[in-house]
Image (cartoon, rainbow, N blue to C red):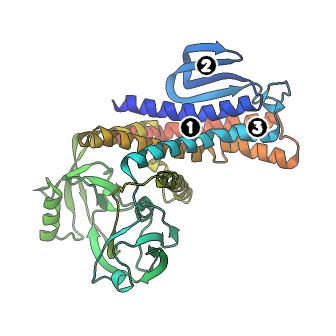
Amino acid sequence: MKILIAVIIFSVLVLFHELGHFLLAKKNGIVVQQFSLGMGPTLVSTQKGDTQYCLKLLPLGGSCMMLGEDEDSQTPGSFNSASVWGRIAVIAAGPIFNFIMAFILSVIIVAMMGYVPSKVLKVSEESPAYAAGLREGDQITKFQGYSIDIGQDLNTWLALNELKDAPIEMTVKRDGKKQKISYQPETTKKYLMGFNRGDTEKLEVASLIKGMPLEKAGVQAGDVITEIDGTVIDTQEDYERYVQEHPLEDKPLDITYEHKGKIQQITITPASRTQVALGFNYNVGREKASSWNVLKYAALEVKYWIRTTVVSLGKLFSGQFGIRDLSGPVGVVDVIGDTYEAAKPEGGVIVWASMLNIAVLLSANLGVMNLLPIPALDGGRLIFLILEAIRRKPVNRQAEAMIHMAGFVLLMALMFVVMYHDIVKLF
C-alpha cells in the first residue's frame, strides 16, 4: 500500500511541476514535443497536435521536452526563439507550480484539521521565564531572533538548534501588543543516551541527537527501545521508572531495541550534556481556523516548509548534516509507509490529512530544490537565462548544454548514493 500511495503522490507532484513548464511554453508559442509522466521505456503514448503525451515505466519523474531546448536554434516554435523573459517564465513555472500545489493542499489541511498556533500553554511559576513576564496564552512571534508564525516554526527551531547556557530572547503578542521577554534559563548537567521520545505508549525514538551515543550506535528514528540493562521497557512509564531508580551515569548500558520488526542489541555509554529548561510548554495541537484565516494559515504552512527546506540545506552545506541525512525515493516511500501505519488506527480523516501533509512537504521541497543554481536543475537553467538577459546575448549554447549534462550525471550519481544509504537504513 505504501508504495502505491508514494507513486500516486510522486506522480501528482511531478505532473503538476511539468504542467507549469507546459502551460507557460504554450503561452509563449514554444512547441512541446513530448509531455511525459515517468522515466524509461514508454508504456502508453498518444499524439495530439505537436505534442506526444506519454506514460513511462518508472514513476520517479517526468519531462516537458520543448523543440530546440538545448540547441542554438531560432526556428519558429523552438525554445530559443521565444524572448528571454518568456523562457525565464517557462523554466520558473515548474517550481512555482510546486508552491501553488503546496498551497492548495495546505488549504485542504487547514480547512479539515485547523492550524497550530504558536501559543504558550503553561509557564512554571518557579521558572525564570515566569519571572521575566511570560504568561499562559502569550503568542510567540520571535524566538532567539527566528520569526515564529505557527507552532511548527518553534518546534523545528528547537529540533535543528541546540539551546545553550545563554539568555533566551523572545517576542510575544498579548492582547494585540508585542512584548519582549528575556531571561537566563535554568540548566542541569545530565547523562543522556541522546534521543527524543515519540508520542506513543511504547518507548519509540522520535528523533536522535546528533553526535550522541544512540545516534553513533546506529539507532534510527522509529526504532523502539524494549530493554535497558536487562530491564524490560514496555511503556514510557517503565522508562521513567527505570531512570528514577537507575540514574544514567558514565557507565556502559546494554540496550535492546526493535528495528523494522527485528530485535537488535547494542552497548552504549551515556554522554554528559547540559540541558536547558525553557520553563514553558507551547502548543503542538491544531485549532480550527475561521473563514479567510484558512488561506492565511495555509500560506504560512507553505512558508514554513519552504523555510525549513532552505534552513536544512544550509545545515547540509555547513556540514551540520551529511549525505546520510538525505533521503531519496526509497527513504520517502519508507516515511510514507510509517506515517500511514501510524495514522491508520486514528481513522480515515487522519490518514488523509497525514498523506496530504507529506505531499505539501514534498511539493515545497521539490520547488526549492529545483530552484537551486545547479546545472540541469531549473535553477541552473535560470542562471544562464538571467545572464543572457543582463548581457543581452546568450551564453554559448553548446557549452551550456555540456554543463547541464555534467550536472545531470553528478545528480544521478548523488541519487544513487542517497538511494544506497536509504536501502541500508531499511535493514
Outermost residue toward the front?
A: 291
Question: Disc 1 residue type?
Answer: Ala
Give how far across and how far down residue 355 sits, in percent. Answer: 39, 40
Instruction: Looking at the image, tell me whether mark 3 or mark 2 is earlier in sequence order.
Output: 2
Mark 1 neighbour density, 10 Å: few (under 14) some (14–19) many (20 or more): few
Instruction: Looking at the image, tell me whether mark 2 or mark 1 is earlier in sequence order.
Output: 2
Above or below residue 191? Residue 179 is below
Q: Secondary structure at mark 3?
A: helix
Cα gap from disc 2 to disc 1, whole angstroms: 28 Å
Q: Secondary structure at mark 1?
A: helix
Q: Which residue is mark 1?
A: 413
Instruction: Looking at the image, tell me whether mark 1 or mark 3 is earlier in sequence order.
Output: 3
Q: Is residue 167 visible?
A: no
Mark 3 neighbour density, 10 Å: few (under 14) some (14–19) many (20 or more): many
| Residue found at x 69% / y 38% | 91
Image quadrant occupied by the N terminus: top left
Question: Disc 2 residue type?
Answer: Tyr
Q: Which residue is mark 3?
A: 87
Q: Does residue 368 appear to the left or right of 305 in the view shown?
A: right
Outermost residue toward the bottom?
A: 131
Q: Secondary structure at mark 2?
A: strand
Q: Are marks 2 and 1 in contact (CB under 8 Å)?
A: no
Image quadrant occupied by the C terminus: top left
Question: Disc 3 residue type?
Answer: Arg
Q: Does residue 76 appear to the left or right of 35 in the view shown?
A: right
Quadrant of the image occupied by residue 370: top right
